[in-house]
Amino acid sequence: DTGVSQDPRHKITKRGQNVTFRCDPISEHNRLYWYRQTLGQGPEFLTYFQNEAQLEKSRLLSDRFSAERPKGSFSTLEIQRTEQGDSAMYLCAARMGGSTGELFFGEGSRLTVL
Amino acid sequence: AQSVTQLDSHVSVSEGTPVLLRCNYSSSYSPSLFWYVQHPNKGLQLLLKYTSAATLVKGINGFEAEFKKSETSFHLTKPSAHMSDAAEYFCVVEDNAGNMLTFGGGTRLMVKP
């Protein structure tokens, strides 16, 4: 158990619908990251938070994507007007301290857009 | 900018034989390098980490990796494969601010009985 939980584990939706994923790290994890992994590929960085502040966003994060971490604890990743190309595994990872602690990954939320 | 290339997308070995998973990286500074393992329907797990200390790094489950700056390589090895080692392995480089990990494309390790 890495202490990082994600919900839901699987989501099937129709194109054009909005979806939201949630990540719950343990309280000591002040850095939180979102990654996207498509089939047969390595995870790609989307964004990260230091406490509640979103400090960096990848160009992969189009304007249909928004991430929040309102109280510096759990985080949500919302995708609006989903497209079939959004089908992927969305991974959350978290670490304690600053930038050097071990990164712990959740088991991911798999999105299928029909 | 940083990048990682895993030279083999699939590696197949027999149980009890050595494992070699190859990784080359590109970085404009002294990088931190990692190997992660991903079993089906499981989260990514850290195998080992290099952060400019000893160039030979030992990890969990008998894996080790050697950092070779002159070759910009960080290959993962294990003397004797076990059936439970079958999984996807990712070589990862971290930027020097610790803000972002860049993953390689992955190597799927298959272990034959």
Image (tube, rainbow, N blue to C red):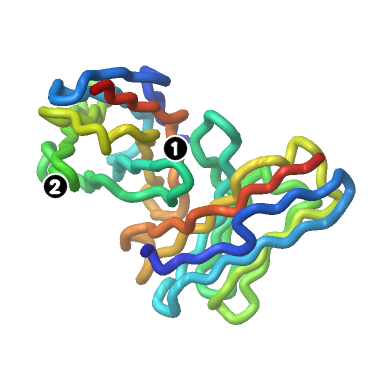
Q: Position of residue A10 (x, y in %)?
A: 64, 53
Toward which corner of the image does residue A28 lie, by quadrant?
Answer: bottom left
Residue B52 picture location, percent across and down: 19, 45
**10 Å crowding of disc 2: few (<14), some (14-19), many (20+):** few
Can you tell which of label 2 and label 1 is closer to the viewer?
1
Identify the residue shown where x is 18% and y is 29%: B81
Q: Are marks 2 and 1 on the same chain?
A: yes
Q: Amino acid at mark 1?
A: Phe
Residue B58 in percent (x, y) is at 13, 43
Q: Is residue B66 above or below residue A104?
A: above
**Which element carries disc 2, helix, strand or loop?**
loop
For marks 2 and 1, give the CA distance: 21 Å
The quarter of the picture where the C terminus of chain B appears is top left
Residue linked to disc 1: B103
Q: Is residue A103 above or below residue B85?
A: below
> Dot 2 corresponds to which residue?
B53
